[in-house]
Every structure is written in C-alpha cells, then in structure tokens.
Image (cartoon, helix red, strand yellow):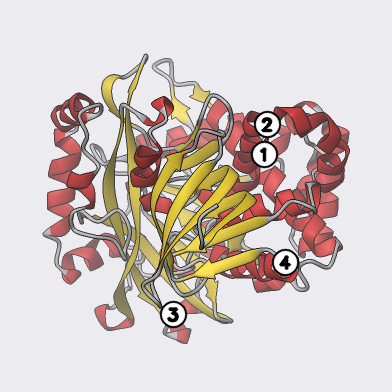
C-alpha cells in the first residue's frame, strides 16, 4: 500500500442528515466497524440539511396536498400519503431510541410539536379538501384530523391568515395536532458529534475528487485536503455517497452501470422570512396550500412556524429559482458536467417534455419582491413588505431518468437510491420528502447492501425501531404503542392521535 493510503470498512461522503443517520445506524449494529466521513465544507449539515436550506417540516403527509391525488371519479387516492406517513413513523422511533439511550440529550433541540394544516380557497378546492379529509380521517395513521369551513373556527386555527380576509369566496382547512417542525441541521450536528465520540473519523474540508473500483473489489477514493492541498487516497469495502446535489457527479465517476442513464436538473428555493415578534406570535402552525395550475409539485406554497437558534420565525414559500450549480457551494459548470454520452438522450428528452417547468422557472426568476408579497398576501392578507425578507434556500437536484410509466427523460420528484449489484456502493439522489424519511431510506440501503448481516442485525433494529418489517396501518395496537412512546420520548402531542386509533 502506497504512502498516504488508508483502508477502512465504510466511507460516508457528505456530512448531512443521510450520512449521519447511516453512520449512527451502523455504529449501533456493527460497533467494531471502522467508519470515515469526508465533507468538503467546514462543518456538518451545511448544505441541504441546514435549517435555512429546507422547510423543516416533518413530512408525514398530514398537510401536504400533493401526496393525495384526486381520481377522475372524484375519490381520493391516499396510498402515497400512507407510505410517507409510515416512513416518518420510522424516523420518530429511531429518534426516540436515541433520546432514550441518551445519545441525544434534549429532543427540543431538534424537534418541536406544531399543528399541520391544509388550506384551500374556492368552491371546488373546498369540496376536494372535504373528500380528502373524509378519506384520511378514517385511516388510523391520520386519526385526530379535523375539518372546518367555518370562518370563526378557522380564525382560531390560523388567526394571522384569517385577519383582514375580505374575500367572500369559500375557504376551508384541515388541522391535525401531531405535526412537527424538525431542525435537521441541529439533528445532523448532534449525530456527527456522537459519531466522533464513537471514534468515527470525520474529515471536514476534504473533497472527494474520484472513486475507482480496485481489483480486490474495494473502492479507492481520491480525496483533496482543502486546507493543506494534499491529495490522499482512502480505500473502503463499502462507500455511501450522501453528498446532496453533489452525489450525481460522484456516482457517475464510480462507473457502475446502475448509475448510467440518470441525469439531474437543479432547482433552487427562495423563502420569505418574518422575524417581527408581533407578527410571528399570531401564527402557530405549518399551513400548506395547493400548487397553482401548471406549477410543479415542489412549488406547493406553505406558511411555516419555524424554531431556529431558539428563535421563532415565519417562513413562506417556496419560490423557485434556477442556478446551474448542483450545490449552493457548487460550480456553475455542474449541470453541463453532468451530461454524459449515456444520459444525453435522457436529458434531451426531459428538456422537450419539461418546457412548462422551464417556463415556470423563468417566470419565478422574474418576480420582484412586491410580486412575491402579492402571493404571500393570498395566505396573509395583512402582510407588510417591511416585515418580510427574502432568504435563499438550498439547491435541489431533481432526478431525470427513463421510466416505464413516463417514458424517456422523466423528471422525478422523490428520493432515489442507487446501489451497485454487489452492494459495495450506494448513492442517494433526489429531493422531497428527503430528510424526513432518512431512517427508512438508510434501512433500505442496509437491506440492499448488507443482506448477509440482516438476520444478525434484526433484533437490534427492532429494538431501535419496533415497527421494523411491520405495517403500522395494519397493526393498530403497535401503532397506538408507537404513538404514545414517541410522543413521550420526543415531547410531542401524539397522545390525541393515539387515543383515536
């Protein structure tokens, strides 16, 4: 072995919530394994996981209307909502385990209970919301949900949004108290700190430049120390690429066939933020609306109570932006550099199919602050421009791939896991619901990449996640137990939901 080359069991690329979650799971399941983390920035969770770079919503499909689809016969398909909710239940169980094991001291440092509301206006939208409520509220995962189209009742649920609302058009909302605001940046930093205490080597300001398969089936990473300029080589039996928008480039460099015919399209987000205490105190909820006709799913408007750095603020958005960068700290050449011979036709097909998205992004980029305030006033009629500032959120790289349903060059709005056939390398691509499903996604990676260990690991996994391998929707006793135990450990308000189950 050449000088400066090291060998380890596992290398995690990127110090975000995904790597932090996978590293923590592995340290619980295989404490003797050696793990290294490489992060090109100076601290953990500075890109997509940072609290200012995402909405901080614990995505459980309690309020997000894009997870429930209206069929042609006016019935509502809630299958995706059930899946997303089950995935978030897995995250809550794992976080509860971390709190109960004293690996996390104070859950209030990263998770807060907050009501989740869906809000619509217009007669047809109100009728849809009522049908959605009738379907969801009869399902045990969504027990405790309320519906109202009474303005006096709505004024109690969302006073800031109903204040000075002069329009006579019908309005309605659903409310469920078991929602959460999650500071994924804080959680990431806690988990990485814990990993360092467990002798995991975390190397900040280290940028992975190349990934190459060696004859012994291990992976060799070429890593640049951004402080000293030195180039290092590190080998590992297993590599996880959890570099956010940077994952696609690294996946391509690995050369695995599973990474071919995949492209990426970067979309940035802009939020309006209010820190005026007089305004902030009038709203205590995450309220999701309905995307305008022709707008992509990631553009669903929402008004959120956020807890960041022990300060309560309001965020409204997202407004879409465009940059060719795949990361906020990336390069303007990222998009062009991602186009290869094997994905060229896929990217070109997407360009033709997604002209409406291109038009939408151009329109969004042209918006002035006052035009953004006009959209905000659909939610908060009394909003004053001087109370709101713009903040640039994170870059998201939407996956483009060929699918059976959508054909060539289909834009994906979910999270994609790509693994080599032998399970020696895995990459996470895509965006929403992202961080909220980190634990479920990392369990999927364990199952795909370490099948030979799963029988041995299963008792420990079930200790950490009691519902592992079981559908909570079909096991009401376990659902009730999980709701009560996670509510107690994390200080949440799921007791009401548990009692309804």
Above or below 130: residue 320: below
Q: Which residue is drawn at 81% across and 41% down?
A: 461
Q: Where is residue 427 in the image (x, y as percent from the top left)?
A: 48, 41
What residue does disc 1 label? 443
Q: Where is residue 489 in the image (x, y as percent from the top left)?
A: 82, 61
Distance in Å between CA atoms under marks 4 and 3:
46 Å
Distance in Å between CA atoms under marks 1 and 3:
41 Å
Tag 3 secondary structure: helix
Above or below 410: residue 327: below
Q: Which mark is residue 447?
A: 2
* Observer-nearest of 202 and 84: 202
What residue does disc 4 label? 199
Q: Residue 21 carries which label?
A: none
Crowd rating for badge 3 (residues with CA inside 10 Å; few <14, some 14–19, many 20+): some
Distance in Å between CA atoms under marks 2 and 4:
25 Å
Tag 1 secondary structure: helix
Q: Residue 279 carries which label?
A: 3
Q: Which residue is drawn at 79% across and 42% down?
A: 500
Q: Which residue is drawn at 69% across and 33% down?
A: 450
* Circles 2 and 1: CB atoms closer than 8 Å: yes
Q: Which of marks 4 and 1 is nearer the N terminus?
A: 4
Above or below 280: residue 380: above
Crowd rating for badge 2 (residues with CA inside 10 Å; few <14, some 14–19, many 20+): some
């Amino acid at each position: 072995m050449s000088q400066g080359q090291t060998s380890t069991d596992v290398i995690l690329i990127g110090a975000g919530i995904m790597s932090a979650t996978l590293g923590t799971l592995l340290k619980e399941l295989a404490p003797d394994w050696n793990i290294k983390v490489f992060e090109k920035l100076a601290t953990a969770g500075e890109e997509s996981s940072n609290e200012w770079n995402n909405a901080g919503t614990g995505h459980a499909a309690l309020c997000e209307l894009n997870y429930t689809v209206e069929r042609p016969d006016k019935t509502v398909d809630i299958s995706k909502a059930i899946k997303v909710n089950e995935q978030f239940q897995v995250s809550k169980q794992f976080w509860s385990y971390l709190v109960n094991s004293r690996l996390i001291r104070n859950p209030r440092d990263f998770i807060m209970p907050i009501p989740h509301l869906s809000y619509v206006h217009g007669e047809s939208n109100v009728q849809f919301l009522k049908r959605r409520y009738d379907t969801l509220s009869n399902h045990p995962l969504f027990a405790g949900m309320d519906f109202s189209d009474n303005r006096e009742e709505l004024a109690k649920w969302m006073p800031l949004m109903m204040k000075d609302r002069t329009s006579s058009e019908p309005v309605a909302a659903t409310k469920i108290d078991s929602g959460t605001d999650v500071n994924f940046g804080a959680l990431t930093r806690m988990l990485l700190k814990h990993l360092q205490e467990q002798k995991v080597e975390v190397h900040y300001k280290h940028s992975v430049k190349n990934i190459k398969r060696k004859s012994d089936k291990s992976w060799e990473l070429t890593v640049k120390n951004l402080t000293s300029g030195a180039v290092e080589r590190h080998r590992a039996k297993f590599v996880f690429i959890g570099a956010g928008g940077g994952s696609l480039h690294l996946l391509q460099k690995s050369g695995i066939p599973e990474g071919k015919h995949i492209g990426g399209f970067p979309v940035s987000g802009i939020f309006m933020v209010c820190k005026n205490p007089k305004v902030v105190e009038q709203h205590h909820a995450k309220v999701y609306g309905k995307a305008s006709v022709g707008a992509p799913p990631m553009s669903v408007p929402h008004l959120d109570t956020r807890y960041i750095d022990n300060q309560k603020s309001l965020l409204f958005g997202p407004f879409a932006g465009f940059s060719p960068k795949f990361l906020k700290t990336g390069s303007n050449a990222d998009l062009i550099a991602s186009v290869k011979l094997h994905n060229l036709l896929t990217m070109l097909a997407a360009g033709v199919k997604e002209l409406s998205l291109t038009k939408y992004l151009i329109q969004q980029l042209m918006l002035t602050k006052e035009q953004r305030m006009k959209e905000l006033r659909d939610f908060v009629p009394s909003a004053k421009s001087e109370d709101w500032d713009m903040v640039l959120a994170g870059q998201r790289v939407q996956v483009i791939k060929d699918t059976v349903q959508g054909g060539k060059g289909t834009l994906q709005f979910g999270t994609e896991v790509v693994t080599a056939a032998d399970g020696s390398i895995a990459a996470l691509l895509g965006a929403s619901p992202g961080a909220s499903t980190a634990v479920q996604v990392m369990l999927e990676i364990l199952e795909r990449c370490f099948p030979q260990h799963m029988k041995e690991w299963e008792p420990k996994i079930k200790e950490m996640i009691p519902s592992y391998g079981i559908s909570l929707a079909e096991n009401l006793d376990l659902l009730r137990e999980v709701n009560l135990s996670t509510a107690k450990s994390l200080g949440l308000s799921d007791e009401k939901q548990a009692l309804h189950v």
